[in-house]
Amino acid sequence: MARCGVHLSDLYCFHYTASNDEIDKRNGWDLYSPAAEYHRMGVPCQGWAPTTLNHSYEICDTYPQELYVPAAAPTKVILSSSKFRSKGRFPVLSFLHKNQAALCRSSQPLAGFSARCEEDEQLLDCIRSANPNAAHMIVVDTRPKINAMANRAAGKGYENEAYYENIKFHFSGIENIHVMRASLAKLIETCQLVTPSMSGFLGGLEASGWVKHVRSVLETASFITGAVAGGASVLVHCSDGWDRTSQTCALAQLLLDPYYRTLRGFQILIEKEWLAFGHKFTDRCGHIQGDSKEVAPIFTQFIDCVWQLLQILPSAFEFNERYLLILHDHVFSSQFGTFIGNCQKDRVDLRLSERTYSLWGYISSHEREYRNPLYRKDSTADVLRLNLCPQSIRFWRGMYNRFENGVHPREPLGDLLAATTEHTQSLSDQADFLTKRITWLKAELERSNSKKGIECDNRILENAQQNGENEESEIGSKEGVCVLGVSEIEESLVSVGALTLGDEGGGEAGEVVKVAPDATFINPSHLVQGTRRLSAPLLRYQSEVCVSPAVLSVALDWRSFRNIRECSCSTPFDHFSRKHHCWRCGEVFCTRCIDKKAVLPGHLSLRPVPVCHPCYKDITRSVSVDTP
Amino acid sequence: MLHRPHQAVLDGTLCITGHHLIVSAHGDEPQELWLLHSNVDCVERRQQGMTGGTLWLKCKDLRILQLDIIGADQFNKVANTLEDLIRVEDPQLQYPFFYRAMYPVLEDGWSTFLPESEFSRLVQPGDDWRISYVNKDYKVCASYPSAVVVPRNMEDSELVAIASFRQSGRFPVLAYRHQANAVLMRSGQPLITANGRRCKEDERLLNSVLAREKRGYIIDTRTQNLAQSAKLRGGGYEPELHYPNWRRVHKPIDRHHVHLDSLTKLMDGVNDTSSGTDKWLSRLEGSNWMNNIKETLNCACLVAQCLDQEGASVLVHDTEGLDSTLQVTSLAQIILNPDCRTVRGLEDRSPFYTHLEDSLNPDIQTTLLYLVRYATPVSGILPISAYTHNCKWKVLVDIAWGTFNNEELFEWPDCNVHPQGLLPNVAVLVVFSYLESLPTPLLYPEDGWHTLGHKLLDINPKPLPDSYPGFFIEEMEELRKELPDGKRLLLDQIIVSIAVTARATGEFDYNGCLQREWIQAGHPFATRHARSCYTPSTQRSPRAHSPTFLLFLDCVHQIHSQFSCSFEFAESFLVMLFHHSYSSQFGTFLGNNEGERRALGCHDRTTSLWSYVNRPEVLPSYLNPMYEPNQRVIWPSVAPMSLQLWSAVYLAWVVEQGAVEAAWGVARELRERDASLRSKVARLRRQLQDLEREALDAGILAVPSPTEVEVAN
């Protein structure tokens, strides 16, 4: 991990250039557009409208420029409310559910023991009344009650139910960043025990409290989900509204909206809840030397929670465990500019989108590795309701013992299934190709047969019988000369693959064949052969060379992953490295050796597919030979 | 009123029969719950005055049912009846003796495991080992089966002498042969006693097993102290002085006495879903269950290591050799022997039909002949005399074989080539394709069938890849579907018989492993499983009752989850075994040993579990869609973080498992689609090739230019 720099500009992302020129530096930076995302949820609408108040970060510098507030809330109310909230983070819209229940987020109010702000109360009332379906709204303070009380002494605190009308208040008891930091440290200590005993491990797991904390975050998210799905609007806050609030809001949305469970949707969710709303990535991840008290595994914990959901519902998410791990890696690695800075303003000031690459750009060019083959869009209900009893929360070996190769399953199912899915794609494409070609050939044969029927007369038949079998081979070679026109077409069809074998290609070939029969039908051998075929041993044919080499350009069987310890480039495979197949030769390669894509003539779609370097060379060479 | 885990409350009528408790719902939806009394571990009651009360039925499959009964009188009657019924001791009154299969039994599971065929892999002619029937009346050792494998040079009389020197008469017998000289044996402890008794025959037996200059290992699954103190109770361990070539290693596994307690603690934790995470984790740790798994696996790995890496022979025993010994020997085999990871040991490489002559009953032979004629498009392809006079399957196979192999047959005047150029003889192809569609390939390169398979089905014969995909011919499967019911049944019977016989030559599948190492080896199922973890501790005896077998299944599950592609069976198969081992309509797990089962007449009076499992309708659901045969030794990780609580067993009634099961369904679907596409592509390629050849002949296509061929290769 590259850390310990003093200035942000020393970070690796400002120096990193992708070795592969396929990735453009701009890729991924335009992924998230707030207007488009809120539009997807149906905002602006009657109840909710965008506000430009924070356009140059004047009200709150840790909030994004684009904010959505109740349409009924006057500017004055918003301004006053922001003054009454810690760090100016007033309640704004985070997610609007189909049933008009809104999920809002903010920081804690500066309530102290008795202070109140009527405008803040009004704002909450506007939020409540933007939802026509519920008479009350729910305020979730994600902190333990005792922490919230302690904050009151410092002039902060929580909403007083007596002042705010129609709210139901709920504490959910997630511990603060310092507890989480210590908890993870203990967990890692347990994981690194040398030859741990079972009770040493389980004891350490329990003592670290990590599993308990993960569960408390999930339970809060589940509570929020239940409330929103039940029709009530919810406001979530913790102290500053950028740690626990980000975790629980993001998880709740993951449970509420299937869109966020897709590869892309999850990126949008992170852009929205974590990046735009100002989770302090640089401080929390310790990108540069700073206050060690600010470092905390809040995002790690969130990723762990998502992994728990993946375990409980293996078909509900489009992405896999590897996707979570790569996200987690690059939040810390600072190879990409995506997670640099503490808030949107920081990132704008650093001009990250011009100077660095975006992680989303990298991921979009490697999506194959991150897809969950078990994903079934319709397998789960839109709103996920979970049983979060302690027994269903697990220790994530893949994360905390990631680099200990010995402890992982030796035969990772996910990768095998992913390979199966790709293999199926390749084969189904070839099946289409074969079907098309068979249909075409059948039609051609029929046509030529009908012509023969008319034009062949007895004289030719007699000739044929006289010539006998000996001439068979000669005739074969003659054919090659006779039907030059056809053979050219064939060549261009099958080997270059530039010509689509669609209707056009078939039609064209057909026309030429019409000309050719003059040469063909004089050939007397076909009738003889036709009759002999019946008596000839069937099996003899099948081992001979295939006429269409295009057919064989697609591997029928792929090599098994088993017992392959390294790639041909000597890169060793460990538990988490994804092994890939070359679609042409079916051998196994590492990610770096399979970065080429090529069109295989045996596929009907002629879509570029992954091939290994030797195959790529073969293909490009043959194309250049055939089409000078 | 019935409360079940994960399901809506059922309001219905309760009916108690001799063997079942049945609740059927009121109302329109026909909903019923059938529960075997033998599945109920304990009944807990709470009466509420005269209005009735609640019964908790705690089951051996770890489920807890809640039954609300109206009326105090009724409540008490029901509770008393149930309490009586779940404690019926007489095995003859058990349900398996009354159960009759509602389906035609294709293959009798009882006859699947004949000792002779079972041991055929262990004992080869001219070998150092032989099958001994010294125990045919179960007098030498009550818990051993009638046939056991012992060193060839040991006389039966010597075995009797050794039996009196070993605990419960369990003299050392062969369990598994890894490589030529590395053998795995098991026994009871030697009765050394405090006086240091010796038994010359025992010493001779053990020494004769070892090749010259070779050392062997005696793995005692007790601690040194325990083994030492066993001497005072008339037991002991082999002193090095008298067994100079054997090194003794103590690899302690907790005795089976503590396992039930451990499971009780675990289930207490599991069933308490309202307490916090900390409490759950500390209960999980306190139960020591995961630690038991770790230690058992550890010991099995040690045994496997001795056998595989040192090529040394191993003798495993504890006190009686009925519990941890069996766990260790069977797990070691699963680690070492790929065949033990299959459901049906079809991995035998010898031509399979040599045994068929004897095993096919005359009816099936007739049927087969009929079928060949019936399904042949043109009758009279084969000279009828060839099979009417000598109706042996082998001959038939040879003839069928001839039809493919012998070009002359194609010249026969009325031979009708299949339009797609597949085959003239559909019937044999049906059988053939059916064999091929079995998840484990039956046919191997040395076997003519395989070459044939390649010739027929693949345009491009090539050496077998590491994973052998197996063929599947859709048309033939459809053809089977089109057959009228009766004929289809006959066909299935034939196929199953072939499979059985094929398996009889290599009895090393997982079922075989279970059968040998657990059922025949005399693990006292009836005693151990009479009570489970919900029985109050006052009513159970730690020595008698123990979930040893569950612990073993859990260990298999741990290996399974680490090598999920190396097992032919799915996790659900293990869960099914767990359920049936405690309570079942089948007789397989009845009694404590073969002798008891023989006395009860299980073979004639009950149905075997394998008769059920091996049916073509049932077996596929227990197969692992991810299976790729793995011929290697698989070394599991025993690090604590690698071992997971088996949720499909312990959490099944607490945490909904539906989503995970559905995901397996998706995986199955993916793999099946891939396999069918593969065969479709292979078929299309073949078809295209024929067409192209025809087109070439017709002059529509040209012979490819050399460059094209090069590109393709």
Image (spheres, grey):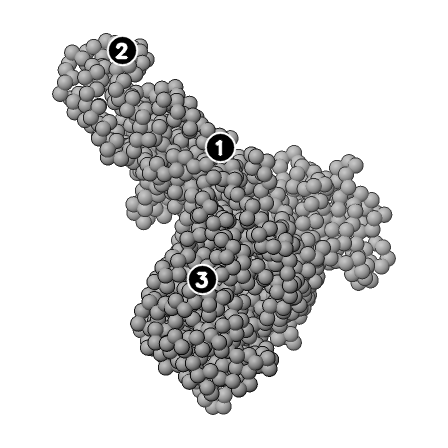
At numbered mark 2, what does the secondary structure look like: helix, strand or loop?
A: loop
Give the camera-side residue of B680 and A305: A305
Q: Residue at x 48, y 76 (%)?
A: A83
The residues tagged by marks 3 and 2 sit, at their Cα atoms, a distance apart of: 80 Å
Quarter-of-image position of residue A233: bottom left
**Mark number for residue A272?**
3
Q: Is residue B684 left or right of residue A23?
A: left
Disc with the residue nearer the chain's start (3 vs 2) = 3
Count the marks: how many? 3
A77 w.r.t. B430: above or below: below
Provide residue A490's location: percent of width, then percent of height.
Answer: 30, 25
Q: Residue at x 19, y 17 (%)?
A: A518
Give the foreground label among 2 and 1.
Answer: 1
Q: Name the residue tied to disc 1.
A: A613
Amino acid at the residue labelled 1 = His
Amino acid at the residue labelled 2 = Gly
Q: Is residue B252 left or right of residue A593?
A: right
Q: Residue at x 45, y 78 (%)?
A: A80
Provide residue B10's location: percent of width, then percent of height.
Answer: 40, 75
Give the foreground label among 3 and 2.
Answer: 3
Q: Name the residue tied to disc 2.
A: A468
Disc with the residue nearer the chain's start (2 vs 1) = 2
Amino acid at the residue labelled 3 = Lys
Give the foreground label among 1 and 3.
Answer: 3
Q: Which image quarter is the N terminus of chain B in?
A: bottom left
Q: Chain of mark 3?
A: A
C-beta proximity under 8 Å, tags 2 and 1: no
